[in-house]
Amino acid sequence: MLPFVSNRTTLFTRYTPDDWYRSNLTNFQESNTSRHNSERLRVDTSRLIQDKYQQTRKTQADTNQNLGERVNDIGFWKSEITHELDEMIGETNALTDVKKRLERALAESEAPLQVARECLFHREKRMGIDLVHDEVEKQLLTEVDVILCCQERMKLHLDKAIAQLAANRAAQHELEKDLSDKQAAQRIDDKCHHLRNTSEGVSFFRGVEKVDATVSVPESWAKFTDDNILRSQCERAASAKLRNEIENLLVVTANEMWNQFNRVNLAFTNRIAETADAKNKIQVHLSKTLQEIFQTEGTIESIKKAIKEKSAFLKVAQTRLDERTRRPNIELCWDIAQLRLVNEVYEVDDTIQTLQQRLREAEDTLQFLVHTKATLEHDLAVKANTLYIDQEKCMGMRKSFPTTLRLVGYC
């Protein structure tokens, strides 16, 4: 059973009034303290939130500024790369055109070389004394050497042009790759630069700030592009220098080949004139020789006729002497008639011997004239063959020498 109230108060009293007042006072004080602390915390929290908000906005603004500056930096280097890339493409195209001209000029030089060699080959078919190492042959050999030397220089510069084009394309490839990377980076950074707190697509990516995927710093990043541009500029300068060298080489080789071509033609013209003059002189001498042969043959016939006539006189004189040997006895007298007949025989016989000697001399002369005629006719044939080779074959081929425009590579 529960005790009565009066009994409970009397029996279970624990605190005094002072305790009660002190308890209330303590609770009041704790309430004031907690409210004060709460108010202060609330004010500080409000201030903290405002400060952090301003700091966060400032940080985001700084980040936006940095991203904008980064986009501008990328745009600057992109414009530099684009400018250098355009210059490099133009230089590569120009060097390619000059290389094609060099290839055409090298191909065009084959025809003059073949013509010079064929001229030397045809001139080997000259005969006899005309197979001489004359000025024409010297100039033809020089022409072959000049063309071969020009071809060697053109081939050397052609190899250089091929190597330079490869270097140009390598530098161009690096620029294009760098430009492509910068375009992608600019798109990404421009997108980041325009992102706002209210933009679509923003989300949480926990731990992304701890991932360091960077491979460069601003200094190395700028140096990489600057090195690519410097490499391209160096290759472009070397390409322009080589292009100028090829241009000058084409002009020099064309002039050298043309000048030597004219020297060979001049030597041919002089040699043809000399050969033609010698041929004309041979014809004159041959005509005179033929005339002399005709006259010598007439002389021989005259001598033979004279010998035949003198033989009749000798027969008469000898017959008279033979008849007189048949005179009888004392009639065999050495008279004036006998003396005269003997002298006549000796005289006629001596005349015949003289004429026969002259006949042999005339016949020897005729044989020498015939030999001379054969020699002249052979020499005339040799000169005619030489004229045909030099004038018809060689000079006929040399009418098709390439023009200066074709020798410098233009169609």
Image (cartoon, grey):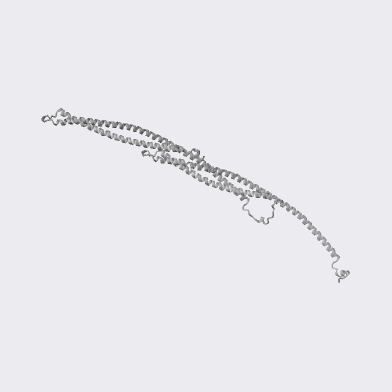
Q: Nearer the viewer, residue 98 or 313?
A: 313
Residue 99: horizontal and vertical position, in percent? 52, 43
Report whether 5 appears left or right of 315. Answer: right
Q: Is residue 296 left or right of residue 266?
A: left
Seen as rendered, the residue at the extreme left is 329
Q: Is residue 205 left or right of residue 92?
A: right
| Relative vertical location of residue 18 with respect to residue 194 in this rendering, above or below | below
Q: Of 96 and 365, which appears nearest the observer?
A: 365
Image quarter in which the N terminus is found: bottom right
Q: Please tell me how many numbered marks the rendered image carries.
A: 0
Of the pair 263 and 11, the residue shown nearer to us: 263
Residue 148 % position (x, y): 46, 43
**What residue is shown at x 83% (from left), y 63% (from top)?**
23
The image quarter containing residue 139 is top left
At which x and y percent is residue 276? 39, 34
Q: Quadrant of residue 272?
A: top left
Q: Residue at x 27, y 31 (%)?
A: 301
Q: Is residue 354 above or below residue 189?
A: above
Image point 58% across, 48% down: which residue?
Answer: 173
Q: Position of residue 380 (x, y in %)?
A: 36, 35
Asked if residue 66 shows in the view, the reply is no
Answer whether residue 53 is visible to the viewer in this image. Answer: yes
Relative to 202, 282 lies left or right: left
Q: Residue furthest top?
A: 336
